[in-house]
Image (tube, grey):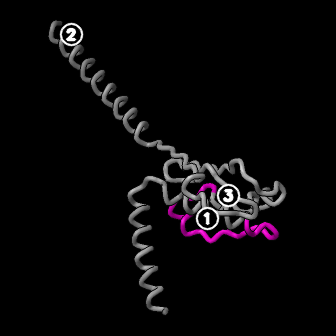
Amino acid sequence: MKKTIIIAAIMLLIAGTASLDARTKKKATSKKASTTQVIYTGDIANKVIGYNGTTPLNITVKNGVIENIEVLQNQESPGYLKRAKDKVLPQYIGKTVAEAKKLKPDIATGATYTSEALIKNIQMGLDQVKSSSSKKATTKKKSSAKKGARKRH
C-alpha cells in the first residue's frame, strides 16, 4: 500500500513538473514573437517636400510586416492628399519591410508631388526599421547598385 501511494505521488509530481515546463515555454515563445515599431518620418524626411510642404508619417511595423501608415499634420491640399493616400498607402499595407523596399508603387494621377513625397517618406522610414536581415540586404543592394551604375557610365 505504501509503495502504491509513493508511486502515485511521484507520478503526480512528474506530471505537475511537465505541465509547468510546457506553460513556461509557451509564455517565453509568446513574449518573443511580437515586436511592434512605430517610425516617425518627420525628422528623418524633413527635406522631402510634397506640393505644399513636408508630409510626415507614422509607419507601424509589427513582426516585420507593415500594419499601418498614418499621415500626420501637413500643409498639402486635402483633396490631393486624399487622392495620394488612397492610391499609395494601401500598396504597402500587409507587405514585409523587404517587400516594401523593393516596391515600385503607382502614384495618384493629379497628385504626383504628394504621392512622390509619401513614397519617399515611407522608403526613408523603412530604412529605420530595426532588423539585422533587412539591413544586410539593403547594404548589399546599395553596393551592387553602385557597381551597376559605374558600369553603365
Of the residues under marks 3 and 2, which one precedes in the sequence?
2
Residue 32, labelled with which disc? none
The answer to whether 130 is drawn above or below residue 36 in the figure is below
User: Residue 38: x and y, percent?
Assistant: 55, 46
Of the residues under marks 2 and 1, which one precedes in the sequence?
2
Of the two numbered discs 2 and 1 in the rendering, the one whose residue sits closer to the viewer: 1
Residue 48, magenta (yes or no):
no
Secondary structure state at the residue bearing disc 3:
loop
The kind of residue on which mark 3 rests is: Thr
**What span is in magenta?**
93-113
Left or right: residue 46 compared with residue 72: left
Q: Which residue is mark 1?
A: 120
Q: Which residue is mark 2?
A: 5
Left or right: residue 29 compared with residue 21: right
Q: Residue at x 80, y 70 (%)?
A: 109
| Other residues around mark 3 within 10 Å, as few (<14) / some (14–19) / many (≥20) | many
Q: Which SS does the magenta portion mostly show?
A: loop
Residue 112, magenta (yes or no):
yes
The answer to whether 116 is drawn above or below residue 151 in the figure is above
Whole-angstrom CA distance, mark 1 to mark 3, is 11 Å
Relative depth, front residue between 124 and 141: 124
| Other residues around mark 2 within 10 Å, as few (<14) / some (14–19) / many (≥20) | few
Q: Residue at x 34, y 34 (%)?
A: 25
In this view, which residue lies farthest toward the top? 1
The kind of residue on which mark 1 rests is: Lys
The kind of residue on which mark 2 rests is: Ile
User: Residue 123: x and y, percent?
Assistant: 57, 63
Q: Are marks 2 and 1 in contact (CB under 8 Å)?
A: no
User: Residue 85: x and y, percent?
Assistant: 74, 57
Q: Which residue is mark 3?
A: 54
Of the two numbered discs 3 and 2 in the rendering, the one whose residue sits closer to the viewer: 3
Left or right: residue 9 compared with residue 68: left
